[in-house]
Image: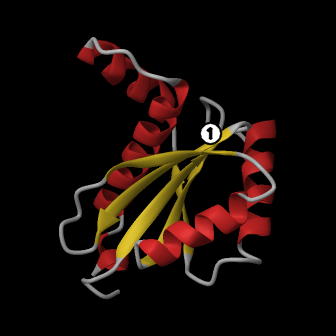
């Protein structure tokens, strides 16, 4: 992948999608935004891909504590199947075990007010950090 591009990560929930971003050069993921799930969500994601010259998407794969497939796993898999009809960049899966709990704990520790969307965007950041660490061959 080009060092000039970026990677977006998505934490897909029932109501919101948390988004994180990292540049290929810096490889320092950070929260970008949280989007409400609406009938525009796929267009909104494509606009972020275009705006940030994203070369790949990383999607958090939710599973049960023992790694089992859950209803949420199936819902996210279907979302990604639909998303792939719109976007034309590679989509990678990354285990998202406990990222939401980790994000909420960090935000609580900061001692500042936060919204549920802040948890989603920070969770996407942890997903992206894990992906960057676990897949150096993808990022080059």
Q: Measured along the vertical axis of the image, is residue 140 above or below residue 131? A: below
Q: Is residue 136 above or below residue 132?
A: below
Residue 48 lies, in percent from the top left, at: 51, 67
How many callouts does the rendering have? 1
Front-most of residues 67 and 71 = 71
- Residue at image position (23%, 64%) is 27
Image coordinates of residue 121 in percent, x first then y, are 46, 41
Residue carrying label 1: 67
**Which residue is pictured at 18% across the width and 67% down the height?**
26
Q: Residues within 10 Å of mark 1 (few under 14, many from 20)?
A: few
Task: In the rendered view, tell whether residue 74 sits above or below residue 91.
Answer: above
Q: Is residue 92 left or right of residue 4?
A: right
User: Which quarter of the rendered picture does the C terminus lie within?
Assistant: bottom left
Q: Quadrant of residue 22?
A: bottom left
Q: Residue at coordinates 47% horizontally, 57% vertically from top-left?
A: 9
Q: Residue at x 76, y 57 (%)?
A: 79
Quadrant where the image shows the N terminus: bottom left
Q: Is residue 34 left or right of residue 12?
A: left
* Residue 39 shows in the view: yes
Q: Residue furthest left?
A: 26
Q: Which structural element holds mark 1?
A: loop
Rendering coords of residue 102 (x, y %): 40, 27
Which image quadrant is residue 70 in? Answer: top right
């Amino acid at each position: 992948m080009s060092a000039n591009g970026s990677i977006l990560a998505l934490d897909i929930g029932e109501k919101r999608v948390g988004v994180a971003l990292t540049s290929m050069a810096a490889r320092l993921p950070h929260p970008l935004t949280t989007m409400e799930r609406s009938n525009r969500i796929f267009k909104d994601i494509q606009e972020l891909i275009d705006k940030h010259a994203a070369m790949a998407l990383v999607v958090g794969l939710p599973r049960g504590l023992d790694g089992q497939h859950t209803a949420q796993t199936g819902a996210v898999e279907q979302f990604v199947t639909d998303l792939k009809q719109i976007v034309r960049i590679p989509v990678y899966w990354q285990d998202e075990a406990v990222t939401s709990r980790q994000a909420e704990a960090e935000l609580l520790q900061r001692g500042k007010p936060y919204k549920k969307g802040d948890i989603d965007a920070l969770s996407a950041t942890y997903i992206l950090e894990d992906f960057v660490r676990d897949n150096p061959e993808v990022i080059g």
